[in-house]
Image: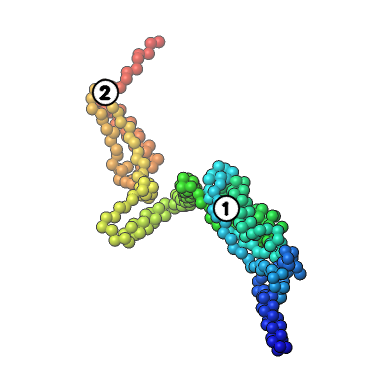
Amino acid sequence: MVVELIAAVLSAGALYFVAGARVVQQFERGVVFRLGRVRGGVRNPGFTMIVPIVDRMRKVNLQIVTMPVPAQEGITRDNVTVKVDAVVYFKVVHAADAIINVEDYRFAVSQMAQTSLRSIIGKSDLDDLLSNREKLNQGLELMIDSPAIGWGVQIDRVEIKDVSLPETMKRSMARQAESERERRARIINADAEFQASKKLADAAAVMSDTPAALQLRLLQTVVAVAAEKNSTLVLPFPVELLRFLERAQPGPHPAVEQPRAATPAGPSVPAPIPEAAAEAHPGGGPPEDDAEELSADLRETLAADPLLDAVRPQRPPDVS
């Protein structure tokens, strides 16, 4: 009888131990409710006991939760319709508040993230959504974290993942980017032309001082063209090279122009040039003494020519 009683007590104790034994994981915290009220605070990780039937323990996960926010469609401040999706990282810091103050903290955080995301879209411009996401992420984090503090939840980070634009807006942005790149290309090309013109002007100044440099440059061009093993060679012949060759040739000595008497009715009589003066100075004009002698001989010849008497003007008689 006594043995049976002891066995029954041991069995009841074992059953009580098994029914009241609980194990809390390292990443969890336990909240014990005794007859509907929180009892004994939060249970730490490890082995713990509760009173069966009377106590009820709920475990809360303290790990960081990654929650995607569904894509929200909205109109930006500059009247562009976009779809934006995001992701929220949060964790529970107060297990009792997460169980008592809110029915489902995950669903509450999700709804608050969607509402805040739509609000951010309406307050921002399209350029901010595309290029200034860090500032928008901070603003979105503050908007979600403010009510989440009372739920025992801490928002760790909020990130905007993607911004979907209409096809017409994508084409407009592509044309804008193409025009911008074309503008830059034209500016760079114009700058290159300006710098090249300066260098060419300097080179032209040097070549004008040294005309032989132009001929050397022409020969270098011919060598560069001939190196391609072409069957046809186009040789540019600049006008400056003609001028250089013209200046390089020695000019003729100025010849002595002999006066010529022309008669309107008869043939003109050329003035004879003394052969002695021409033989004495074959390469140029006669000296001053020879010129005086030539002029005297020419006057005598003209005075003795009978053909010139007919055309020589007669002086009127002197009436005194």
Looking at the rendered image, the quarter that the N terminus falls into is bottom right
Between 249 and 61, the one nearer to me in the picture:
61
Give the mark nearest the N terminus, 2 or 1: 1
Disc 1: which residue: 131
Disc 2: which residue: 264
The reply, left or right, for residue 38 in relation to residue 254 is right
The structure residue drawn at horizontal position 30% and vertical position 28%, both measured from the top left corner, is 261
Q: Is residue 66 visible?
A: yes
Q: Amino acid at mark 1?
A: Ser
Q: In the displayed structure, would residue 59 be above or below residue 107?
A: below
Question: 10 Å neighbourhood of mark 1: few (<14), some, or many (≥20)?
Answer: few
Question: 10 Å neighbourhood of mark 2: few (<14), some, or many (≥20)?
Answer: few
Residue at the front extreme of this rendering: 1
Between 276 and 83, the one nearer to me in the picture:
83
Mark 2 and mark 1: Cα distance apart in space:
98 Å
Q: Amino acid at mark 2?
A: Pro
The structure residue drawn at horizontal position 66% and vertical position 68%, both measured from the top left corner, is 59
Residue at the top extreme of this rendering: 320
Residue at the right extreme of this rendering: 40
Q: Residue 275 at what x, y percent from top left?
A: 28, 41
Q: Residue 173 at what x, y percent from top left?
A: 49, 47
The reply, left or right, for residue 114 in relation to residue 202 is right
